[in-house]
Image (cartoon, rainbow, N blue to C red):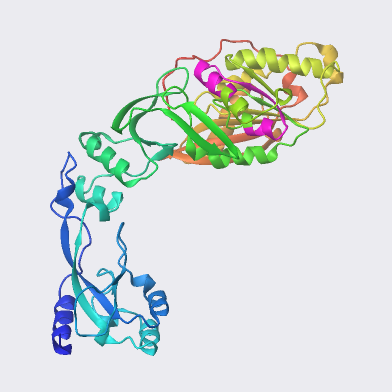
Amino acid sequence: MTLGYIREILRKMSSTTCVQLVPVGVRGMKVLDRDKFLRNVQVPVLKVKEENLSKITQICKTYFLKFEAFRPVQAIESDEIDSYQKCIHLNPEKVSQFTDISETDRTKLKQLGVTEDNFDSKEIQLTYDNWRSDIIFKAVLPENEEGVSGFSQIGHIIHLNLKDHLLEYRPLIGQVLVDKIKTCRTVVNKSNIIDNTFRNFSMEVIAGEEDFFVTVKENNCIFQFDFSKVYWNPRLGKEHERILSYLKPQDVLFDVFCGVGPFAVPAAKRKTKVFANDLNPDSFKWLNHNAKNNKVKSDFFKSYNQDGKDFICSVFKDYLTDLCNGKEKVEGKIHITMNLPALAVEFLKYFHGLLKDEELTAKFDQEIIVYVYCFAIGDESADVAKKMVIENIGCDISSTIIDIFDVRNVSPKKEMMRVTFKLTKEVLFSVSDDSEPPCKKLCVSE
């Protein structure tokens, strides 16, 4: 191949529109046909000798042609008369001619004997195995519409919340994710509505095995549970870690809506004394399984299967009473986690006037920190969250609020917030207006 011929190829490449490295002819596919993702494309290459190969590839890394199951540096297998042994494949979206490589990098390459004479083009064949899932979805799903914007992975399960316009594509979407994510065996499309007392979702298996038993690791603990029957949000791992960092071995934790134990189990394992409660019998089952599986000692862990109101008005109240009477002893702080963001603030009223015995007032001298979670809708999330807490606890606790923290974005203008405040003697011994608990079967969205 003459230098003039190479330059003619380069001239044609540079005068045309940049090569788009995407599958073609697959728009609207609803049942996955892997063969239709086959595509031949012309890409730029550098043909180089083995000598100084490691230094050359280091310079060229930013220009590499990167695909799944594709090596950008390959041996030249043809019987060409030149002495080149390696072919470095470059991304045509970045490089169409040698001068598209930065001047600094070209200077470094020339010092290693690589010049424009080494520049060539080559046809390669791309298959389904080479395309990433996001590239496949972009090529297949409707244009100018929101695609598969994200998903959660819980153990081997991928959890999707597909928009209505994507529902007819769900078999393809699910199969692509099973193919492309090595740790995935099951894909579910899960309704965004938590439609019952226990915060578990309705779901549909759209690809893979119908296996909901998962194992996940978080904060040095192993959690196992049936994902179809309990609540677990992998996006809360950092928040669990934050709260755990506030707990000391001499502290006590009351976890009112504990689920399968993301706060309770690691806290007890670190020798904080934990009282963990959840109304869902399946959560209660897996909570105890996880405590046992993580070798949590019974001295540091007690579990309850009660409504949140009953847990506050019996277990927590009795503990405070015993504390005042000297039957219990706390060397550190008492912490209360209330992670039921759609309803937790409605349970705050049960702290107001919880202790009726005036003789205990003088004996009460305990720091109690509450971490209550809520959904705040609107632009001023912190103000909304603060107002919700004050209204529900039934008195102005502004002076005892320690922190209002934005945990995560749930949807446009909807934030999951955490309000941290001190539960004081004034609140616990106040005269309260007893009223009915919030509706347990309220339909709420997460």
Asked which quadrant contains residue 21, the reply is bottom left
Q: Quadrant of the C terminus?
A: top left
Please give left or right for residue 338 compared with residue 192 in the image. Answer: right
Question: So how many labels did they put on this image?
Answer: 0
Asked which quadrant contains residue 239, the reply is top right
Please give left or right for residue 322 compared with residue 16 in the image. Answer: right
Residue 271 colored in magenta in the image:
yes
Residue 82 colored in magenta in the image:
no
Residue 287 position in % (x across, y down)? 57, 24
Please give left or right for residue 270 compared with residue 341 in the image. Answer: right
Q: In the picture shown, does residue 55 fall above or below 289?
A: below
Residue under the image location 14 percent in, 78 percent down: 12
Q: In the picture shown, does residue 375 fall above or below 409?
A: above
Q: Which residues are magenta?
A: 266-288
Please give left or right for residue 43 compared with residue 408 in the image. Answer: left
Residue 335 position in % (x across, y down)? 70, 30
Q: Nearer the viewer, residue 269 or 308?
A: 269
Q: In the picture shown, does residue 117 fall above or below 337?
A: below
Residue 80 can be seen, yes or no: yes
Residue under the image location 26 percent in, 86 percent down: 116
Q: In the picture shown, does residue 24 fall above or below 388?
A: below
Asked which quadrant contains residue 62, the reply is bottom left
Q: Quadrant of the N terminus?
A: bottom left
Residue 264 position in % (x across, y down)? 63, 29
Q: Nearer the viewer, residue 117 or 53?
A: 53
Residue 432 can be seen, yes or no: no
Residue 228 position in % (x across, y down)? 41, 24
Residue under the image location 74 percent in, 23 percent down: 299
